[in-house]
Image: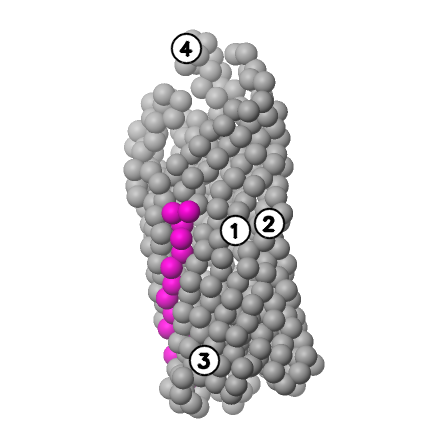
């Protein structure tokens, strides 16, 4: 929750480019995270039978890298490499909700040059642009029994290697309101995603559709975040933040198949808001710890939720310990737990109803960082 007021690490190149002006030397900051989800659906209705899918979450390992260069007393240049978006589910081919999704995977990697400028001793501004590579894949079962008669096995359609290069500008500022209070604001613009991929069919006994390519488009939301860092004492700091994300713009997903067939999926998503609070203790500029909690509202009501994006409200708990190894190097280890709501679902897809909720739905992030100061 301290990101909008980050003035002490090279990761400010991504979190708030204005905060880079708080760095008095060149700096490299590298991180590594293990993402360990547990996503288990418990069905209450499954008119076509099937399994609950077990743990549908996919464990992933995500690196990140940031660099800030002190160009002069007022100007900093930065560059970052992060995965700003991603996730996936794999329920298996026999899943009760297979006619909507049996597997879905989204990954995005962005490289972001940025610049920060100190206007005066209290005000700094910054800007950057994220150049983002996005990849999406999805498997959906085809209910051939509804078309060819009872006992006909499922077919499958796969959307594969759907990729896109896009960009997302961002702006930031920091303002030292008092000797103890620092305010930070970050705005990220809306980003258009227009994926081009292949469509493949498997195990069909019905006539194969004449489709082999697809364009998938949506808008990633603009968002605004503000934060406050307040120095309680020489060793203790309080962080507050809150923000808004325009997820209603993501709601309309358009699929255009080769041959001119166009389909629009309205997910009926809403805008979201989030808020958090954190505490940091620093001992003699050598070691310390942080703890924090935050909340993020759900972008979708229960009646509109789907199996490919089983999102709900999120409560986050986080903690980290950091220490100095030498005059140039320091380290940190930390963990964040996302506790996601039940994400109730009740869908009728291809004439089949699947309903229930996720009785285990959380994501654990474990990671560490290394910072080198020139």
Side of 330 where 178 appears, left or right: left
- Magenta part of the chain: 236-249
Q: Secondary structure at mark 3?
A: strand
Rendered residue at 48%/25% (across/down): 141
Q: Give the number of the disc on residue 175.
A: 3
Which circle's residue, 1 or 3, is located before the other in the chain? Answer: 3
Rendered residue at 44%/12% (across/down): 147
Q: Position of residue 279 (x, y in %)?
A: 40, 77
Q: Secondary structure at mark 2?
A: strand
Disc 4 residue crowd, few under 14, some 14–19, many 20+, Cα 10 Å: few
Which circle's residue, 2 or 3, is located before the other in the chain? Answer: 2
Q: Is residue 131 above or below residue 185?
A: above
Q: What residue is shown with label 4?
A: 150
Q: Give the number of the disc on residue 191.
A: 1
Disc 3 residue crowd, few under 14, some 14–19, many 20+, Cα 10 Å: many
Q: What residue is shown with label 2?
A: 166
The chief SS type of the magenta part is: strand
Q: CA distance from mark 1 to mark 4?
A: 45 Å
Image quarter (top left, top right, bottom left or bottom right) of the C terminus: bottom right
Q: CA distance from mark 3 to mark 4?
A: 67 Å
Q: Dots 2 and 4: beta carbons under 8 Å?
A: no
Q: Dots 2 and 3: beta carbons under 8 Å?
A: no
Which circle's residue, 2 or 4, is located before the other in the chain? Answer: 4
Which circle's residue, 3 or 4, is located before the other in the chain? Answer: 4
Which circle's residue, 1 or 4, is located before the other in the chain? Answer: 4
Q: Single out the mark in the foreground, 1 or 4.
A: 1
Q: Residue furthest top?
A: 149
Rendered residue at 30%/41% (across/down): 302
Q: CA distance from mark 2 to mark 3?
A: 31 Å
């Amino acid at each position: 929750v301290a990101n909008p007021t980050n003035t002490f690490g090279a990761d400010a190149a991504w979190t708030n480019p204005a905060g880079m002006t708080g760095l008095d030397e060149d700096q490299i900051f590298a991180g590594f995270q293990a993402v360990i989800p547990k996503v288990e659906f418990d069905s209450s209705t499954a008119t076509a039978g099937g399994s609950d899918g077990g743990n549908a979450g996919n464990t992933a390992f995500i690196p990140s890298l940031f660099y800030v260069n002190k160009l002069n007393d007022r100007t900093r240049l930065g560059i970052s490499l992060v995965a700003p978006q991603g996730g996936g589910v794999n329920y298996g081919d026999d899943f009760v909700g297979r006619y909507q999704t049996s597997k879905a995977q989204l990954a995005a990697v962005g490289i972001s040059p940025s610049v920060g400028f100190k206007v005066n001793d209290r005000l700094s501004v910054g800007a950057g642009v994220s150049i983002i590579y996005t990849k999406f894949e999805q498997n959906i079962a085809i209910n051939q029994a509804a078309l060819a008669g009872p006992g006909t096995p499922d077919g499958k359609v796969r959307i594969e290697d759907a990729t896109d290069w896009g960009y997302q500008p961002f702006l930031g500022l920091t303002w030292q309101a008092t000797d103890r209070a620092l305010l930070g604001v970050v705005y990220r613009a809306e980003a258009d995603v227009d994926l081009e991929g292949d469509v493949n069919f498997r195990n069909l006994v019905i006539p194969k559709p004449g489709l082999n390519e697809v364009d998938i488009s949506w808008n990633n939301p603009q968002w605004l975040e503000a934060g406050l860092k307040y120095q309680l004492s020489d060793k203790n700091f309080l962080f507050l933040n809150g923000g808004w994300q325009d997820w209603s713009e993501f709601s309309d997903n358009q699929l255009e198949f080769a041959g001119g067939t166009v389909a629009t999926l309205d997910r009926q998503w809403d805008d979201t808001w989030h808020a958090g609070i954190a505490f940091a203790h620093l001992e003699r500029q050598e070691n310390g710890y942080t703890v924090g909690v935050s909340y993020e509202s759900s972008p979708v009501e229960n009646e509109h939720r789907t199996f490919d994006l089983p999102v709900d409200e999120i409560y986050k708990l986080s903690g980290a310990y950091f220490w100095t190894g030498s005059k140039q190097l320091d380290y940190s280890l930390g963990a964040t737990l996302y506790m996601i709501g039940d994400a109730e679902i009740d869908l009728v897809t291809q004439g089949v109803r699947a309903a229930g909720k996720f009785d285990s739905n959380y994501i654990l992030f474990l990671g560490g960082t290394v910072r080198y100061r020139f």
